[in-house]
Image: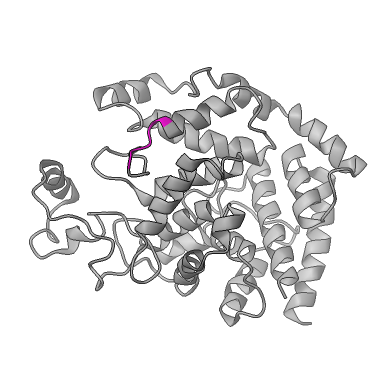
Amino acid sequence: MTLLSDINRVVQESSRKLLQMSMPPVKYWLLVDTLGKNHDDPLVQRTIDECRAFPPRVKLVKALRPDGTWPISRAMKLAEDAGPGPPVGWTYETILRNLQLLEDMYTEKSEGYISAALERILSWQSKEGYILGPKHGLFPLPQYNGYAVRNLFIYGLEEDPRVKRLANWLLSIQRHDGGWAIPYVQDVKYLPEYKHMMIDEFMEHVRRGDTPPSDPKGFESIPSCIWTTMMVIRGLARSDDYRRRKEILRGADFFLDRFFKKNWHTSYRHSEKNWTQLKYPPFPGNGISALYLLTILGYGPGDARMEKPIKWLLSARHSDGFWWQSDRPHAQKDQWITGFALDILNRYARNH
């Protein structure tokens, strides 16, 4: 049996099983993305109504406050207040995560205070285009800016000049090998005078301004970071305009060429095991995240590099026809992971 016929069989079998028992948002994406049904299909219309009434979605929408923020725990709030305040801290990270979850559950910008949350993110934008935080206010983190631009794109702000400025800032710091890296931590830190320092001591030097600048166009002997690159592409690939740009394909090639390999940087998800960990939500990335992006960008059977990862994805399917979360099977999260896997396989075959 050829790979493509095997994929078609798996997609048909597992889609049929998932459709019979999936919660509304998983069913919606399965119907529309994988099975190709239109919005005027009666089953799709019923599923949209079920999504709107889906209790976890309703609860998350209702919890969003008029100022565009979600409540955070008392401990998180104390830690945030002890620092410079948002965007450094848990408020920003919670907004990013919850906007992603709501989009997964079929939520539109017009609902609740979604627009206020998007404006809250943009209120933290610097004149250069980036957003600081949420880990610190020393320098911008490309992976979180990629996460931000993803949310801004998926809620329809692609044409907003502020969002374009953020996306263009990300493109401006693309490195020599097509990828992205965390400033200072993944370039300056390797200089002889800093490479043996503990990270906290090194960051104190950065805080005091004692270190030379981090230059995305320099440090060419140091490769980019697989997972930082994936997070940036994960954002930019959600725009029809940016998706077609050669810089995005260079970034995708960077992590496709390193599929199943260790990240060169020990500071961020160094182990090759990260590739085969199945989790939902997939922040900051894994093999399914990579394949989802690659197939969206048009990679398919015509690229020989894709065959091994696709075969791995097929092999990760269990005898019940589903993919399970790696650390602990979870009924709802396994549905999401299975839905992503089926979408990837179906799109890969269509890219033939």
Camera-side residue of 337 and 321? 337
Q: Quadrant of the N terminus?
A: bottom right
Read off the magenta span: 123-127
Q: Quadrant of residue 298?
A: bottom right
Question: Residue 97 at x, y = what percent?
Answer: 51, 37
Let me know if residue 125 is in the magenta part: yes
Please indicate whether residue 288 sits to the left or right of residue 10 in the image. left
Q: Residue at x 53, y 50 (%)?
A: 282
In this view, the residue farthest toward the right is: 42
Quadrant position of residue 43: top right
* Vertical relation: 49 (above or below) 329: above
Does residue 29 appear left or right of residue 164 in this picture?
right
From this view, report whether residue 13 is shown above or below residue 40.
Answer: below
Where residue 345 sits in the image (x, y, percent)? Answer: 70, 65
Q: Which residue is located at x 24 percent, y 73 percent?
A: 221
Q: Residue 179: x and y, percent?
A: 39, 65
Residue in the foreground of this view, choosing between 186 and 275: 186
Question: Is residue 86 highlighted in magenta?
Answer: no
Residue 92 sits in quarter: top left
Residue 266, horizontal then vertical, whole percent? 29, 61
